[in-house]
Each structure stands twice: as structure tokens, then as C-alpha cells.
Image (spheres, grey):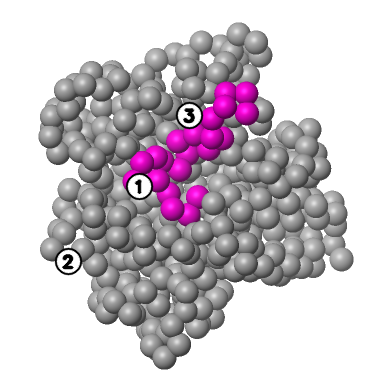
Amino acid sequence: MSTDTIAKPACPVHGGRDDRKTAASIEAGIPTFPGSRVTNSFRFAREILRSPEMRQAASSADSISFDKPEEVSFFFLHGDLHKRRRASVAGYFAPKAIITRYNPLMHATMDRVIAEFQAKGSAVLDEMSLELASDVTMEIVGLTNSDPRALTQRIKTMMQAHNSFDKRPLYRFVHDKLFGWLHKLVRTRRSLELYKKDILPAIEARRNNPGDDVMSYMVQNNYSMRGMMVEIMTYAGAGVSTTREFMVMAAWQLCDHPELKERFLNATEEEQFTIIEEILRLDPIAGYLYRKPVSDITETAEGPIEKGQLLAVSIRGVNSDESIVGECPYQLDPDRAKRQKIAGSYMSFGDGPHRCPGSQVALHETRIFLDRLLRVPGFKLQKPPTIGWSLSTQGYELRDAIVTCDRI
């Protein structure tokens, strides 16, 4: 039985205080795949995610053909193929690239976002975070030769085509089974539009003048149209969708904890990252990470594992494992990681060879987004977001939070 279903004791110090925003809705929003063996153990999760015997699993992983690895997202590759693909993109996420290339872009985007916010006096928080996340991700990918706002909307629309935001099983049955053929045609049309309006101009620009981005790499290595689409949508899901959601979550938490908001605004950059990572620990974007062993494993922290057993690592569960995070695991406590002498993000970005390569970019985006936005005169969270869950990203979606400020 999943330990997610076992009642957890109240915090002995704080009388049951629980600062998590998504804990109550995750099981209804993102149920585990049938036959999953769920773990909330940090130690066991680390074994699973670091084991060379494990492969990505669940969703579409089992149906992927590796005959053309260049047309497979590096998310699903393993072994030497995965290492080579990771090595090819490592420079895009290096500290130097973040500081010299992406941070100036983040500030430029926030200048524009805040100017529009102050001119209107109100805004939708997730639309603001979407603009920043999209600008940065498209710079990394190299889709920079078309209208950035139109591109953002195209990416947003394509991601929503696979979305199940607050939709019940009957809706999914009608959408996916009865009208699946129609939605497939729509997705194909949108993909062709993205290719024509955004990818082709980027390809032409980089044939004669390669840049330091993913598109230049794909052009130099003769990627097919399908290969380019797979890679771009991988970055769209990992870089746009997930980071967009977390920026909203972090702003929501700080607005609900005025003393922590004040601490954040008066903190050094290092201390701000500490606060952000603790928020991420409580409400990690991903719900579960799935793996399957390719052979029997006789010894682990939770006993033997049979070949082919579907394993579900509950990121919320392992990030609340008291043996690692200490007492009161559901309390927002930025001093926790230092006290426990462990990295503050815990398992929020995964672990092992498939740990999120863009984790530092996401943290920098979130820090700049919060630091710039919360300093706007009169800033206030007028309406908190609605929580939904996406099957495509296996994570939460926060929509329609309204923020206001003094107009100028």
C-alpha cells in the first residue's frame, strides 16, 4: 500500500501546521499509474534514480523506439546516448551562460512586464510568469528570429492541447477517445505552424551564423523536422511550463507569509535562493518520477525489486522524509537545509543522470521574478490561484491569480 494514504502525525512542535499548497489535491489530480510501487523514502528514491539498471517509465516511455535516437527526447535516452546528449547542452546551463546571457534577458523581460503591470494596475500572475519563462527558454533553444509574443502563445496553445487542467475522467474519455482523431489533426496543424513561423527562420539564420544554442546544434547535426519538434517541445515542457508554475507558487507562498516576504526582500542573493528552494521542497512541481528496472535487483533500502516493476518516486513524499529533512516536515522553514546540512532543493529537480539540467536557470528566473515583482509599489495578491493538474507535465498548474499595484 502506498504510504501516501497513511495518516501522518501532527507536527509535535507547531500543532499540525502545514504550509503546503498542493498536498490536498495531488492524489485526485495526478493518480499514480496502475501497478506502481510508490515510495516516500529519500534513501530509496536516490537508489532508484541513480541506478544504471533503471529506465524512464510510464506514460509514453514504453512505446518509444530508439532506432532514431536523434528523434527521441534526451529525457528518455539512457547510457552513452544520454551522456552525449547531456554533454552537448551542458554549456547552455553553465553559470557563465546564466550570468552573462540569461540574467540580462530576465531583467529586460521583467522591465517590460512590470511597466505593463503598473500601467494597468492589475495583471494575471501566471501570464507574467509565462512571459519570463518563455523568453528565457526560447533564448536557450534558439527560437529568436520570429515574434516572441506570438511564439509564446503558440507554445502555450500546444502545451494546453495535452492539458487536463481540472478535467475529470469523463472529459478525458470524450476528448482523448471519441475525438482523439480531431485533436491529433489540430496538433499536427499547430506543429506545422510552429515549424513554418518560428523554426524555419531560426534554421536559416543559423546556417550561415551559428549561435550558442540548441537550434545551432540541431542544424549542425542535421536534425529532421520531427527531431527538432521533439527537442523543442521537451524544452517547452521542462523550461516553460514547469518554471512558469513555480514562479506563481513562490509568489503565493511569500504573499501568504509576510514575514518571509520581508526576509526575502532584505536578503542576499544566496539567502533568497535558500528561501526559494524551501518553497520548492514543500510544493515541488513534479508529482512523481517513474522508473522500471531492466533486471532483478536483489538489495535496496526497501527490499528486492523485480525486473519490470513500475516504481513511482513521490517527490512530495521524499521531500518530507523526516530522516532527511528533520522535524516538522510540512512547515516552511528556510533554515532547514543549513541545519540538516543538505542541498536545499532535496529531490525537487530529481537525482542521478536525469536530474533536471536547467535547475539553476529556473532558480535564477524565480529569484529575479520575485525580487522585481514584490518590490513594485502597492503590490498585492488580490486573488489566489486555482490549482489544477496536468497529465502532460505530471505537475500542478496555477491559474487566474490576480495581482494589483499602484498605477503610474
Q: Is residue 125 above or below residue 112?
A: above
Relative horizontal placement of residue 75, taking residue 211 as reference (left or right): left
Kindly identify which residue carries mark 2.
68
Q: Main secondary structure of the magenta part?
A: loop
Q: Quadrant of residue 309?
A: top left
Q: Quadrant of residue 185?
A: bottom left
For marks 1 and 2, the one nearer the N-term is: 2
Report the front residue among 45 and 131: 45
For marks 3 and 1, the one nearer the N-term is: 3
Kindly identify which residue carries mark 3.
319
Q: Which quadrant holds the N terminus?
A: top left
Residue type (three-letter) at the residue carrying disc 3: Asn
* Local secondary structure at mark 2: loop
Check the image and name the residue furthest to the bottom. Answer: 208
Q: Residue at x 35, y 47 (%)?
A: 354
Expressed as whole percent of the image width and height from the top left, the position of residue 80 reads: 23, 55
For marks 2 and 3, the one nearer the N-term is: 2
Check the image and name the residue furthest to the top. Answer: 12
Expressed as whole percent of the image width and height from the top left, the position of residue 44 reads: 33, 25
Contact between marks 3 and 1 (CB within 8 A): the answer is: no
Residue type (three-letter) at the residue carrying disc 2: Lys
Q: Quadrant of residue 344?
A: top right
Report the front residue among 6 and 309: 309
Relative horizontal placement of residue 319, taking residue 20 as reference (left or right): left
Expressed as whole percent of the image width and height from the top left, the position of residue 285 reads: 48, 43
Q: Residue at x 60, y 34 (%)?
A: 278
Q: Which residues are magenta?
A: 338-359
